[in-house]
Image: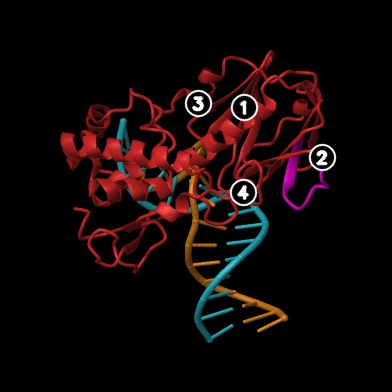
Chain colours: A red, B cyan, C orange
Amino acid sequence: MPELPEVETLRRALVPALEGQWVSQVIIRQSRLRWPVPEMLAHHFPGQQVKRIHRRGKYLLFECCQGYLLIHLGMSGSLRLLSPVSSPQKHDHIDIIFRNHQCLRYHDPRRFGCILWISESPWNHPLLAHLGPEPLEDSFTGKYLYQEAQGRRVAVKNYIMDAHQVVGVGNIYANEALFLAGIHPNRQAGEIGRSAYQKLVKCIKQVLQKAIEQGGTTLRDYVTLTGHPGDFKNFLNVYGRAQEACVRCGHPVQYQKMGQRSSYFCSNCQK
DNA sequence: AAAAGGACCTGGTGGC
DNA sequence: TGCCACCAGGTCCTTT
């Protein structure tokens, strides 16, 4: 569900509320997420102070004195900050309660997300060690994406959604960035030129930045920390708009299944 | 080594 | 109203 803008929106809301706070209790109602939630979390995490909250790709990292809490929201996960604490509803799997009585509640119907504890350096953790650059950092350039693509026959859409190439570009924003760049999602990654990649990188940064400013995209059940939906859906050009007129040229937006993901594009604007 | 497909889950929607 | 097929924001793992 959440892509980078949603996770970054969440992080920005969590920072003022939780940095410096002390954990008093962890309640695990359902430990069967993508990987089992470690039992030790309930014993080890209370008593620790959240020093800083980081994001890497779509992972949130709560830095504490003795390690890091790693959270990924998967497809349907969300976090709510409750004060006072309300009674847990269906799929409210984990509560992290703080000494000031705030409760950070993890909700995830499909349970594709994860909550893990990392006691050593998190950047060496297998889930994080091989991730590509952050799309909004200067190290993510058209030159980089072009060079990495040489010899690759995979469709460019799948290529930019591969977290080993660049993190944080999920299905919505891959569709949107390719539309803005005028690149057809089916084109082979290795056959796209340097200047097109420069434009694509510019568009990826632009669409992610704008989505963050709007508090993310809400399609179904995504909500921000306080339970409000994000507003970026109002700015989507192609995603979810099959058959509608392209905002640029009026041709109907095409829908196509690519792998297990749906693609939306304008075959007139995207070559 | 790279690409494709399956797997993990629940819930909502639309057709019959 | 019920049943069924299909769809959904992710990504690791296995197979080809």
Residue A119 point in image, percent of width and height: 65, 17
Residue A262 seen in the current view? yes
| Residue at 60 percent of width and 45 percent of height | A112
Q: Nearer the viewer, residue A227 or A254?
A: A227
What amino acid type should be assigned to the residue bearing mark 1? Answer: Val
Whether labels 1 and 4 belong to a single chain: the reply is yes
Query: Disc number at residue A84?
Result: 2
Query: Disc number at residue A15?
Result: 1
In the depicted structure, whether residue A47 falls above or below residue A71:
above
- Mark 1 or 3, nearer chain start: 1
Q: Secondary structure at mark 2?
A: loop
Residue C11 point in image, percent of width and height: 49, 38
Closer to the eye: label 3 or 2: 2
Q: CA distance from mark 2 to mark 4?
A: 18 Å
Callout 4 crowding tier (Cα within 10 Å): few <14, some 14–19, many ≥20: few
Query: Disc number at residue A128?
Result: 3
Callout 2 crowding tier (Cα within 10 Å): few <14, some 14–19, many ≥20: few
| Residue at 42 percent of width and 50 percent of height | A172
| Residue at 44 percent of width and 43 percent of height | A211
Q: Are marks 1 and 2 in contact (CB under 8 Å)?
A: no
Q: CA distance from mark 3 to mark 2?
A: 34 Å
Residue A200 point in image, percent of width and height: 26, 40
The residue under label 4 is A228
Closer to the eye: label 4 or 3: 4
Relative side of A244 to A29, left or right: left
Whether labels 1 and 3 belong to a single chain: the reply is yes
Q: Which residues are magenta?
A: A84-95
Query: Disc number at residue A160?
Result: none
What amino acid type should be assigned to the residue bearing mark 3? Answer: Leu
